[in-house]
Image: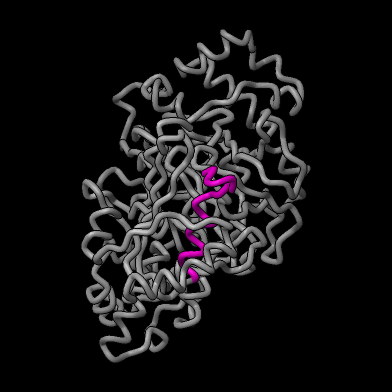
Amino acid sequence: MAAGALLRAAKYLYLHRPMAFIPAIEQKKLSEQADFQWEKLGPALVYLQQHSPFYKRLFRQHQFDPKALRSWQDFNELPTTSKEDLQRYNTDFLCVAPRAIREYVATSGTLGRPVSIALTQNDLLRLAYNEYLSFHCIGATEHDIFQLMLTLDRQFMAGVAYYSGLSLLGAASVRTGPGLPAMQWDTIRQLNTTGLVAVPSFLPKMIAEAEASGFSANDTTVKKVLAIGESLRDDQLRPNALAQQITRDWNIQLYGTYAATELQTAFTECSAGKGGHHHPELIIAELLDDSGQPVIPGEQGELTITTLGVEGMPLLRYRTGDICRGYYEPCSCGRHTMRLGPVLGRKQQMIKFKGTSLYPPAIFDTLNSIPAIREYVVEVSTGADEQDQVSLYLYSDMDPASCNELLHPVFRHKWRVIPHIHYCSAEEIRQLQFPNHNRKPVKFIDHRTLF
């Protein structure tokens, strides 16, 4: 959808807020969605050729003329864009004059140096429309009060996006930011908050604070959580250990989401809980194998995206590094869009440890399933033999000897290897998770010299 059309849609939604709204294209067959995107793709490529210094060079190098594009097979032959390209040539992706920019946000830098993303006024409206769709997916209405328990400064796009989406929906926002469970509960009980936007690993701390204060989380007004930054599903779309831990003690509806700053778009679960819904009017999504070819439906591949309707810094076939599966059967919610499963791993983060291949999400899921582990950080480095070495930094209420006796059999069963284990105090873990006042907790530290 072009930026102007999104602007009109955003204004209409703001004025009318139709609660039964699902974009018509999301109810069409996948073939019709592909036809819709094909119509939008040509103008998007011409826009890149005219305005993006990076893509002008890329098209020239590959002797590509956007007007010569004839089929999706031709599209599959176009070169991809990497995260390293965006880091190295950051400003060359900009398609507008500086005076047109209304907001600068930045990536978190999880996989390297952060990059800046510039948004125009239309990009901000597109972002609001995107999160309007996210909130609609989870069944939110104008009567909800959502507590935004996430960073709303430090150039964090998510804070701006969710706040704007709630404004478009007509719901109320409470900008508490992250941390301090007691303060969060005080606000919830004072304002009768009905929904949260939060990192899910913070919710067990909320539950523990409620119990310590003599009340149950189930006796409060909160009924739903839009969970960001961490997965809630395993590779079969079942609730993972963290989701099970939360819902065991809190009868609450959890909705997972996948997003990245560069995409300016989110994939959010509906009540069916079968993956995050793709919005074809906002983004073209591919899942590619190592050779850059589309994977067979049901197989895992690297999520690769092309933005639609972005003015400031649009992207073409941008490889996110995230390994996921797509699900293509129609959803019970009425949408027929592809749904994106959880991130199974990141290409740059695969660990080869003592002959075993591991991805951080699998490690996190195991650690989250062990009640004795209160908090953790996973560190990988390169050993003297130039092989990956894995260390776990754990905070536990158990003494180290007893905890090791509990953990070693679990690690052997789940991973077939036992990493190096270091026990830390709560303060030491906090310092590891929030170095340099990071805006979200770091649970994976990669010190490898070779990838």
**Relative height, residue 284 to residue 291 (above, below):** below
Q: What residue do we see at 32% from left, 86% from top?
A: 211
Q: How is the image coloured?
A: one colour
Position of 77 compared to 389: left or right? right
The image position of residue 142, as x and y in percent, is: 44, 68
What's drawn in magenta, residue-wise?
351-369
Magenta-span inclusion, residue 74: no
Residue 14 visible in the snapshot? no
Dividing the picture into quadrants, the one containing residue 402 is bottom left
Position of 330 compared to 49: left or right? right
The image position of residue 72, as x and y in percent, is: 74, 28
**Relative height, residue 392 to residue 373 (above, below):** above
Dividing the picture into quadrants, the one containing residue 115 is top left
Dividing the picture into quadrants, the one containing residue 424 is bottom left
Between residue 3 and residue 229, name the one nearer to us.
229
Q: What residue do we see at 27% from left, 53% from top?
A: 432
The image position of residue 381, as x and y in percent, is: 40, 41
Magenta-span inclusion, residue 365: yes
Quadrant where the N terminus is found in the figure: top right
Q: What residue do we see at 44% from left, 72% from top?
A: 405
**Relative height, residue 262 to residue 134 (above, below):** above
Between residue 269 and residue 354, name the one nearer to us.
354
Between residue 389 and residue 195, name the one nearer to us.
389
The image position of residue 307, as x and y in percent, is: 54, 35
Residue 105 visible in the snapshot? yes
| Number of residue marks | 0
**Residue most extreme to the bottom:** 214
